[in-house]
Image: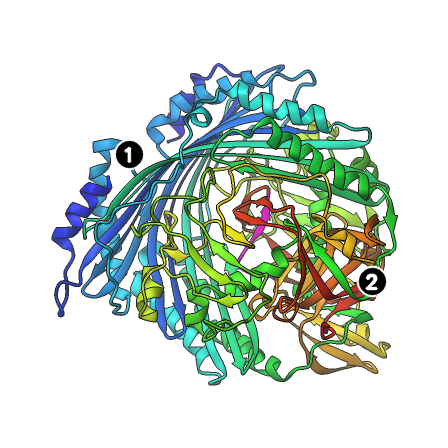
Amino acid sequence: MIDALLELARRRVDGGRRGGGGGADALERRVERTALAFEAGRLKAAGVTEEAGVNVRVLHRGRVGIAGTTNVGVGEVGAQHAAPLLERALASAELGEEIALGFPSAAKLPRVDTYIARAADAPLERLIQIGQFLLSRLAREGCQVNVAIEREVGETRVANTAGAEGTYRTTGVGVSADVWRIAGDDVLAIGDVVEGSDLPSDEALEAVVRSITTRLDHALRIVAPPEGALPVVFTPAGLSAVLLPVTQGLSGKAVLQGISPLAHRVGEQVFDEGVSLTDDPLAPGRTASRPLDDECVPSRVTCLVQHGVVQRFIYDLETAARAKTESSGHGQRGIFAKPVPAYTNIIVGEARVPGPGSRVPGELGGGLLREVNDGLLVDDLIGVGQGNVIGGAFSHPVALAYRIERGEISGRVKDAAVAGNVYELLKRIAGLGDDARWTGARFAPSLLLEGVSVARR
Amino acid sequence: MIDRLTAALQGSRADFTEIRVEQSWSSAVTMRGRRLESATASEDQGGFVRALNRGAGWGTASFTSLDQLEAMVARADELSRAVRLDRPIRLADVLPQQAEGVSDLDGDVRGVSLAEKKRLIDAYNGEMLAVSDRIVDTLATYRDEVSEYWYANSEGARLHEVRPEVTLSGTAIARRDGTIEKGLESIGLRRGWNSVQGKAAGFRAVAERAVRLLDAPTVRGATYPVVLDPELAGVFIHEAFGHLSEADFVYENPQAREMMTLGRRFGKPVLNVGDNGAAPGLRGTLPFDDEGTPTQDTALIREGILVGRLHSRETAAAMSERPTGNARAISFRHPPIVRMTNTYIGNGRGTFADLIRDIKLGVYACGAFGGQTMLENFSFTAAYGHMIRDGQVTELVKDVVLAGNLFQTLDRIDHIAGDFRWNQMGGGCGKGGQYPLPVTEGAPHLRIEAALIGGDVPPSA
């Protein structure tokens, strides 16, 4: 449909007084999802979702307009829906202010594997097997096991009136498992997720089992939390509270809004030398990878922070135009809204392209516990993302955390909270673990930070 | 459309089949700072089929192409049959309803141009910007939707509704040097264009507060007597208790059932909690849930004792209780799951002044920037707070984070005032990947004898 749509747009869109400034781009996405829900140890539901949608943006008389629809139809039939959609985008442009948005021209796209036939073609029975394997390996007395499996097969086409285009197919398989244990008023839930373009390997599933059982075993004993300014190990999953302010601050949008503490600090040593952050849309086997962004900008690896020095911010076409710079290829758009700058895969630590699987070692903390005489290992916090995130200050009760005593985990702590300022804490990193793994679209090791405020309640 | 659904149901081989179809028109205008961020009008449409067979599990299919309806009914039946179950899924009986419901559109938003919508939100945004040059950034969004909804099942239910919704939200960011503070305004109504006129004062107030917060000290972290305003009390009861009262949390888990045994004491006799999907005029209100069950007022805690929970047809049957009309889906993309509607703490007695009169040192926590519960633990970030000293509300404080254990905290609610109010906010509730579901919360002012307030962060090493 979008080719018909862009053809129409070429005729309708007006370059405006300055001339030549008009144009349009569009994205069409079709997705078929298969989902299985295993509840309390048994398969309860199976479902499919078929969705299609088109998002179009016009630059008309120098102003930007957006429209989206799921009323798309199939193939040629879709063309009849193009005209009303374009009219809505033009109406939206009437209201906008002028912006010098430039649509990229045709370019060679990098190769990245986003589609794995084996995952796309796997029959329902194969997905059920994966769930049953996890159920049987995770079953234990007094616990309830839930497993969810989702396989998505998609096709994305993005194109603009300047001649740039790209079409790619994607597969994604997500398998999550949660073990719930309720004893009196103590509720414990420990879960893990393995996600990638391919079906998870047996090793990856075993790693999920090991990761959950290790944390569950350590959690059975409840100990009193320590108190004071203490060393805290944040696991790859527990890192979110520490990284969120930084990734928010590295968004070109926050810089433009004047709320990023990192604005004007490019080239400065803001963090410890051990802090490196890279956005990698080309990581093989990851569901966030793609050959081009949703605005036709070819994908490339972006180094955001190198050895503690801020390198650059992420931009989409519009924020780049406002900031008078170039898009870094981070335009992301849904069906109903305009593109926004968003990360793909975030790699924490030394820049490298990790393998597709999740690697979970047997030991919590990736070897960092040895350094800690009395402290905390944080795996999950409550309320991350609430409040005034971008300033860097955080304060969260723990959802899942363990006490470290004399280099070993002594038990789970409840009723504790951790607090600190990310910009202070990341000035010095006491250690990076050897347990780097994928958590969603983030590849990171455990991190040992000193002087984190730990409070009891 | 109902005839099409009836024909598709007749073609189904499954023992039970239900179909939902939705068609919605929505528009949104967002201002950021002094400029228009976006103005869009969207159309969304699609359907959801759910099938159940004896000895089998649920099969579901959702789709955006309505031409696929018959094929999707067959697909859902097929998937149901692929899920073999030894313990069958049963559905509690609900009298099949036939109803035609058109909510009061209160000025149909579809008849208002995008330009008029822009003028409205531009004006509210302007109110925030005009407050002070300390306001460095704003975000103001107008959003509306009218959705037409059809539901039919193989037991004979046939429903058709037209539902309006309109929300306004505003964020004002104040900054001085390195200090950044924000104020949030949020209004959400199941109404139309007329209901969002004349709302400038609220936008101005949050921007003024953001500026005042720049000078406010951070609250000193400690355990205090804490008074919650109706907004925060409502968010608290929804997040911290409401989710535990959703029966899908307990029905398959014997330990959870024990924890949530009816008759268990959850609080002092002053505490009454309920969920009312039939309360007139609220955002969480609908005549029927997404299984065709009529909504109702369900008592959850009465005089401190757990007396009820929220059900779908499946959880009600599994626990031999009655469906409460709480099976809801955010859209045709999702299956109905057990959700809240309009959750409330019932009115107590006396005034706000009575609550604080004998507090020597305490915190008055107001508004909510956010809240999260993790099982029995919760954390809420108040929008702002005031210290209470010797029975008086005194200085403004910021970074008021209320954290605690649900059971302890509910039990420590010792005084509830008689100033109940519904909070008609936008946003919504998230669960099981379904966000945002329109809900409302309501409460009077209430007092917690002792609660942990996190605030100041000691300087790190």
User: If you read the primary sequence from the N terminus, does the residue marked by circle 1 or circle 2 appear first?
Assistant: 1
From the top left corner, tell me how far across and down residue B294 is, in percent.
Answer: 59, 38
**Could you say which quadrant of the image residue A423 lies in?**
bottom right
Left or right of B156, for residue B193: left
Question: Residue visible at 45% across and 63% down?
Answer: A251
Give me the chain letter of mark 2: A
Question: Residue visible at 72% across and 75% down?
Answer: B459
Residue situated in front as seen by the camera: A369 or A230 = A369
Callout 1: SS: loop
Same chain letter for marks 1 and 2: yes
Residue situated in front as seen by the camera: B14 or B163 = B14
Please tell me whether residue B133 is drawn above or below residue B318 in the rendered image: below
- Is residue B430 found inside the magenta-colored segment of the image? yes
- Is residue B246 found inside the magenta-colored segment of the image? no
* C-alpha gap between disc 1 and disc 2: 58 Å
**Quarter of the picture holding the N terminus of chain B:** top left
- Circle 1 residue: A73
**Could you say which quadrant of the image residue A62 lies in?**
bottom left
Q: Is residue B443 visible?
A: no
Give me the chain letter of mark 1: A
In this picture, which residue range is highlighted in magenta? B423-431
Please tell me whether residue A398 is drawn above or below residue B85 in the rendered image: below
Please tell me whether residue A135 is drawn above or below residue A30 in the rendered image: above
- Label 2: few (<14), some or many (≥20) within 10 Å? some
Going by the numbered disc 1, the residue's amino acid type is Gly
Q: Nearer the viewer, mark 1 or mark 2?
A: 2
From the top left corner, tell me how far across and down residue A371 is, in percent.
Answer: 77, 56
- Circle 2 residue: A456
**Quarter of the picture holding the C terminus of chain B:** bottom right
